[in-house]
Amino acid sequence: MIWGMGQIAIKLGNQGISPIWQAGLRSLGASCLILLWMRLRGLPLKGLPGLTFWRLALGLTFAGEFVFMYIGLGLTTAAHATLLIYSAPFVVALGSHWLLGERLSPARWGGLLLAFLGLALAMSGQPPKGAPQATLLGDLFCLIAGIGWAITTLIARGTGLKAERPERTLLDQLLVSAPVLLGLSILLGEPGLFAPTPIVWAAFAYQTVLVATFSYLMWFVMVQKYSAASISAFSFMTPILGVAFATLLLGESVTWTLLIALALIALGLKLINRT
């Protein structure tokens, strides 16, 4: 549910904070909170040696992901964005097959096909009434953001970072991405904070505290305690909840095309994650 509301919070935050500046501030704020968390728990702040290249690669990819995500959410609907960003799990499955030697069964190949068909269907639909005219460009940016998310997962799984503590890996992403995003925002001439209403601040706080800090850390804790396969099924609900929240809170219309696309993606992801 927290992740399903994430795209809604970004769209609301964009109404008063420039997209890339908002992403950079989120990374900066979450970095401070995670550093505090690690200090209170007595966790070592120093990471494993010899992984500087992969830490930078991870952080830069993470930064690029959120550049496309935050800009894309200003150009398309939150419902479309949620569907496309959460294409990441099956991109991870495909990358794992080709790059990490984790072979896909016929059922999982079928899941990939269904999920890609769902994406194609979602992007082919007409923009809802009142949506920005550049919906196709926004959809493309959100799809690129989903691919970026998948790449960060593959880097974390397929390199020496897999031996690092989850908190430290998340901190690497945030510490590298914060100055990159803030610097890019300045170079692009974004106005930064231009309409700081209570709703905008609440949306930003939600992203920083609940999404980038609390939910990510709790996810890592659950992955350590329980089978990853058994809890991953809950992430299938994120696109569904994202579309529901977009309809209820932003008044976005949901077409039959979008609902069918959502069903195809959910079924595809389910097949991909079968044990």
Image (cartoon, rainbow, N blue to C red):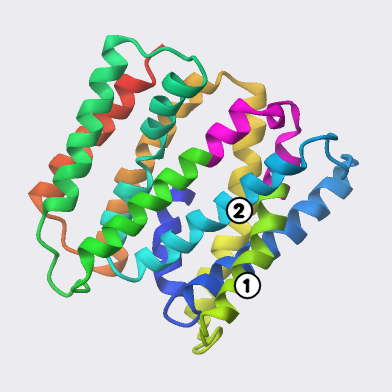
- Is residue 126 toward the left or the right of residue 171 in the image? left
How far from the left and from the top, in percent, is residue 91?
Answer: 39, 34
Residue matched to label 2? 60
Disc assigned to residue 20: none
**Residue 120 is at least partly visible in this image:** yes
Q: Residue at x 62, y 33 (%)?
A: 156
- Is residue 253 toward the left or the right of residue 155 in the image? left
Above or below, 190 against 227 in this view is below
Residue matched to label 1? 182
**Residue 77 is at least partly visible in this image:** no
Q: Residue at x 35, y 71 (%)?
A: 74
> For the residue marked with disc 2, what is the amino acid?
Leu
Which one is earlier in the sequence, the residue at label 1 or at label 2?
A: 2
What is the spatial separation of the Cα atoms under label 1 and label 2, in whole angstroms? 13 Å
The magenta span reads 152-171
Within 10 Å of the Cα at label 1, are there few (<14), some (14-19), or many (20+) other Cα atoms?
Answer: many
Q: Secondary structure at mark 2?
A: helix
For this rendering, which residue is in front, 240 or 87?
Answer: 87
